[in-house]
Image (tube, coloured by chain):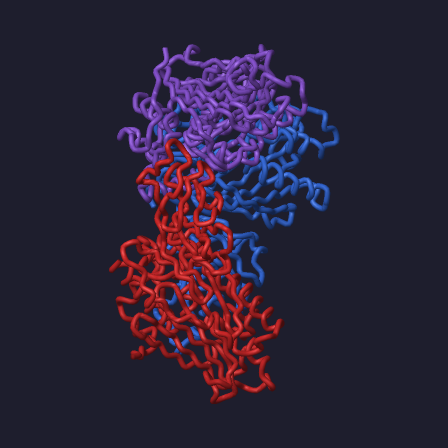
Chain colours: A red, B blue, C purple
Amino acid sequence: MQKLVKPMEAADQPKNIAQVSPSGSDTSPKFVYRAWYCGAWADELGDNLLARRILNEPIVMFRDEQGAAHAISDICPHKFAPLHLGKHLGNTVQCPYHGLEFDGSGRCMHNPHGDGKVPGAAKVRSFPLLEKWGVLWIWMDPDFAPDESLLPDFSQLTDPGRRTIKGMTHVKGNYQHSLDNLMDLGHAMYLHQASVGTTGTMPKVEQKVVQDGKSVSDLRLYRNMMAPRFYAQHFPDPSREMDFWSDVQWFPVSLARNFVGAAYPGNARTADSVNQLGAHFLTPETHKSSHYFFANSRNYALDDAAADAAWVTWQETALSKEDSSMVEAIQQYEADVERLGMRPVLLTVDAAGMRVRRLIQQMTESA
Amino acid sequence: MQKLVKPMEAADQPKNIAQVSPSGSDTSPKFVYRAWYCGAWADELGDNLLARRILNEPIVMFRDEQGAAHAISDICPHKFAPLHLGKHLGNTVQCPYHGLEFDGSGRCMHNPHGDGKVPGAAKVRSFPLLEKWGVLWIWMDPDFAPDESLLPDFSQLTDPGRRTIKGMTHVKGNYQHSLDNLMDLGHAMYLHQASVGTTGTMPKVEQKVVQDGKSVSDLRLYRNMMAPRFYAQHFPDPSREMDFWSDVQWFPVSLARNFVGAAYPGNARTADSVNQLGAHFLTPETHKSSHYFFANSRNYALDDAAADAAWVTWQETALSKEDSSMVEAIQQYEADVERLGMRPVLLTVDAAGMRVRRLIQQMTESA
Amino acid sequence: MQKLVKPMEAADQPKNIAQVSPSGSDTSPKFVYRAWYCGAWADELGDNLLARRILNEPIVMFRDEQGAAHAISDICPHKFAPLHLGKHLGNTVQCPYHGLEFDGSGRCMHNPHGDGKVPGAAKVRSFPLLEKWGVLWIWMDPDFAPDESLLPDFSQLTDPGRRTIKGMTHVKGNYQHSLDNLMDLGHAMYLHQASVGTTGTMPKVEQKVVQDGKSVSDLRLYRNMMAPRFYAQHFPDPSREMDFWSDVQWFPVSLARNFVGAAYPGNARTADSVNQLGAHFLTPETHKSSHYFFANSRNYALDDAAADAAWVTWQETALSKEDSSMVEAIQQYEADVERLGMRPVLLTVDAAGMRVRRLIQQMTESA
């Protein structure tokens, strides 16, 4: 059941939203632990040991002999050596320093020293992993069992009726700045002029913000405009005016799916449209950096290498450079924003993003 | 009206001066705001957006359609994006992220979103700029109107009877370390042996320290010496002994003019002398870094490209490398100096520099 | 008189040792000052000024006209310029900034300014140096006279019956992590597989830990094994099983000598064996970095350039890369270890290392 949220007018900002400042959330930063995060693309993990810091935890991922993926703490409890510098031995990771071996549950399975007894304290934390839709989803809360029902649907990623292009980048910024970016796709009109073919002006838009349980959607429709080149080029007559939409939906805590496309007037969001589903997973590395996993799944030109290349270019320019550079620039000004006590001025475009910030803040407080 | 200040003997240091340690001023650092700083050379600013951090404020400078220069905060009040990454549109700067436009007064002149109303809070701080003598002077105090009478005379920079060579560098050091350097030009005998042609020994010097209101001068005259090559080479017989002087005058807070030259005995500081006026503007970037603007205006060899090149070399070696490297090395030892509780030992050469430090400390305390 | 210490079983760890965590020692880190440290290899110091930070003190070393080595503070007491950027003038160092000259006792011997009187405060701290066995040993405690009897015997370094290969590296890690490494040479079975020719498994070992006064030794004998290639290759029949031993002895605070070799069964540690003495001096630079001086003195192949090269390679790979990279990786996890409140799990191999940590902790507390 959906609840419609009227887009906020600037003059109509609720006081309590105005206090959820981007900088405020970093003054005493907390992570949300009771949630699924993208730990890795599943195909990043073969026979290798994959080290990654997630929610500030140093983690090493590996597969056992049955191919099941595991994630354990990367810090050996003996001398604190990084396990990922060791060897992958069947079902275990062998510490590079003294040869202790740990399995996917974090238990030490072998101590080569002395009488070989394993000290009771010789274990590391294990993090539940769920492999689904080509993603290794990681559960970071040690106090609650992982709950698969909390995982939103990203079946698009392995939908045989779509073509998916994946990638990732590292962002030197808090993940919430990236979520701000995603929850207001209108920024494309300015920030992505080069990559998406927008014109640097803001066309008239019909905007709706919808909250469905803990999920928040921002829906935008631009009628009778010259659609951005990226989409228009797949139509017989790209010079005709079209309807263009860019919808985005957020799921706790750092997952978003966007739905963008163009169609001749009256056909927006129908089967006749040229559309793509975007997946955006912003996994916090630290409070000031993130792993940004992205994928674009299109319903057109499925076997078209040029279309593949165009989406690779899109990811390398719009997502990895334009969006992420902006997030990093904002992160660099964070200390100034805090020093100056600045509060963000809210515009109509921020209704969804601020709602997301408020929900995240509630989650950090209740956790 | 000038007040003569006897150079201090090392044994005769006033207690209160001895307590103005270079490190002390950085333990609880404060800037002086009620003053003109060099924000930029005027010719740095054409159609571009010029970003610069000054007294720890991120600032963007631009010219309006009439050519008047403006300086406003670089942090967009909406999502805290850096305005200097946006576009220069006539009289405004357009934010790169969502297209808000700000004019030189800091007001938001255009909101392309929703009904286009501009939220009352959508404004940024504006910093008064005064363009004079080829400099964009910036006034950093929000509580006091800019006072042009506080600007000392640097008309030398655009004096048609002189030839001026300008430049700037970035120094990873507190500006007061650079002022120490300038207020004791005797350091040239050691630090600038390569660039200025000194000999690594200290000749006999007549030194006077003069305070005139809030300005401090250090005047030095070396009689009957072999003048440094840099000056001597412009005389018919460079092998004759000459009088050589190097005077320097400081104006609050970070402006200095030096007057250096050589003449045959008895002609020091007269029209027959070969002299140059140096301008040195040390604009604090942070408490640990500075923008160093420098200019040398000579009264000889006005149309001499070789003389131009010599002064460019001087700026690149003596000022940007020798002086600034020394300041940076001192800055790097600052944490050690504080940890060890070191107080600077004072020599006669420090009389002017310590007076300047004391005046700056008074200004920070009264501000 | 030696006291035998039984190797600890993991289940038998004394509570007070368990509390000497590697991270714990860095939470409120202290250095031990009443000890000799390796300041430099003697042949690093000729006519040059040698700057080195030791126990967080910036120091400059130089030789006087008689060749005697001196170490004084590198911070000029006048303007805090680094003396090592100045000139070496016979018996003094001349400050690069204003020409003050300091001799090896730290006294200012020349002030070129004003009347030339030297202010009483114009002096720097001097650190006693002892040149012996090719090492400049430095004494860091200002409150106690240097005590040569505290210097352990490293005459091996200049023993004409041995061939010594020396080197040094910089380690971005606390010196105690490096001592942990040295006090458990069994790590070679895992960490040095490539460089030393071990097999990545742990052979049966006879281990003894001996404390002799304030010195701690860890003695290990592996009987009837295939000796590591590095040693076996010097025997007529390298394919025979041998006895292999690796002993290490620690002396306060950061000096270690190891004794490693191979022999046909029954000849371990005898004149018939192929052995080498290693010297390892870990001089703290800061609490998070060290100067690692190492030397290997062998009793075989004295005039063999290939053996020289092999030991150079050993130092460049096993010591500078494998060991030091591990120490640096552990240092990088230190903040995580502290945040997570991790205590090291102890194994039998840690008996000597933990005893060393406990003795160092006692020294920091009594100092």
Q: Residue A5 vs residue C94: left or right?
A: left
Q: Position of residue A65 (x, y in %)?
A: 46, 53
In the figure, B140 relative to A273: above or below? above
Q: Position of residue A196 (x, y in %)?
A: 54, 72
Which residue is at the front of the view, B55 or C266? C266
Q: State the count of labels.
A: 0
Location of residue B1 by image quarter: top left
Q: What residue appears at the point 61 percent right and 74 percent down from the top-left corner?
A: A304
Which residue is at the front of the view, B3 or C23? C23
Which residue is at the front of the view, A240 or B185? A240
Q: What residue appears at the point 37 percent right and 23 percent down from the top-left corner?
A: C32
Q: Position of residue B338 (x, y in %)?
A: 39, 32
Asked if one can make out residue A83 in the rendered structure from this viewpoint, the answer is yes
Q: What residue appears at the point 48 percent right and 20 percent down from the top-left corner?
A: C257
In the figure, B331 relative to B81: above or below? above
Asked if one can make out residue B87 in the rendered structure from this viewpoint, the answer is no
